[in-house]
Amino acid sequence: MLVIAGLGNPGSQYAGNRHNIGFMAVDAIHRRHSFSPWSKKFKAEISEGEIAGDKVLLIKPQTYMNLSGESVGEAMRFYKLQPSDIVAIYDELDLAPAKARIKVGGGHGGHNGVKSLDAHCGKDYRRLRLGIGHPGNKDLVHNYVLGDFAKVDRTWLEPMLDALADNVELLVKREDSQLMNKLALAVGGKADEDKPARQGKATPKPTGKSHIHQARNNAQPKKLPATGPMAEMLKKMFGNKED
């Protein structure tokens, strides 16, 4: 079984917060696929289903963000799972809006929900981080993450969540690079945009002439001297034949 845990805060007053993008992501997956109705267990709202032939448990901890690990850890122990069987989806201040990254393990980066997961589940779970941007001043972070997404954010937020729901089988099959490409393309980015060019990839030929070629074409032919010692030497070597 794979547990996909979206992090957020329960209650309608938090539903549209940037901090709740994890809940939004899990809700999008639930809507798109055949999952059971939400029920309450493990101090969370949970739903079971099957994706790509594997059992999947969607979980939205209802403990509030700072205690998310209590809920996910309880589910992990009940099903006798390992940290590698968990994917946590949450907001990332250090990523620009519309950016997504996934990794295994790492630090919590000051995110209290992740800090709680680390304490209750270990650190070696997959972390799907969805960028919300940074307000620019650490004193503004609290109000920023607990503020609602702006209307302009819908231009990338909805396509990203739709793409995640459409391609969640890649997450289940651990094809993380392919999933990142799908999310990037959904918001108008480029696939593998942060990766160096692959070795052996053909370099496209320039459409115009090179700078060297242009310089050669623009150079004027030098005139040979008509008089003097150099002229006499050239006459002896080549005669009087014209070019």
Image: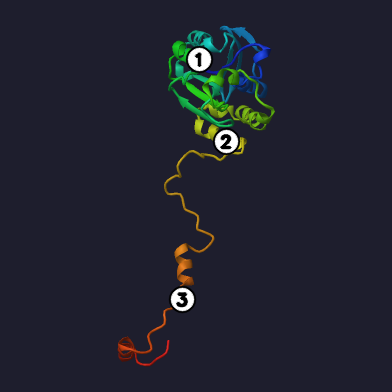
Residue that label 2 marks: 184
Q: Where residue 228 sits in the image (x, y, percent)?
A: 33, 89
Tell which of 186 and 81 is nearer to you. 186
Coloring applied to the structure: rainbow
| Residue 52 in sight from this viewpoint | yes
Location of residue 50 with respect to 75 vertically, above or below: below
Is residue 203 toward the left or the right of residue 21 in the image? left
Q: CA distance from mark 3 to mark 1?
A: 71 Å
Badge nearest the viewer, 1 or 2:
1
Q: Where residue 66 sits in the image (x, y, percent)?
A: 53, 11
Residue that label 3 marks: 220
| Residue 22 in sight from this viewpoint | no
| Residue 37: quadrant of the picture | top right
Label 1 vs 2, first from the N-terminus: 1
Query: Residue drawn at (44%, 78%), measured in percent from left and top?
Result: 221
Badge nearest the viewer, 2 or 3:
3
Q: Decide: marks 2, 3 in contact (CB < 8 A)? A: no
Question: Which amino acid type is marked by label 3?
Answer: Gln
Question: Which amino acid type is marked by label 2?
Answer: Ala
Q: Where residue 5 sits in the image (x, y, percent)?
A: 55, 17
Residue that label 1 marks: 112
Tell which of 212 and 44 is nearer to you. 212
Q: CA distance from mark 2 to mark 3?
A: 51 Å
Query: Residue drawn at (46%, 21%), measured in percent from left and top?
Result: 109
Label 2 vs 3, first from the N-terminus: 2
Element on which disc 1 rests = helix
| Residue 151: quadrant of the picture | top right
Label 3 vs 1, first from the N-terminus: 1
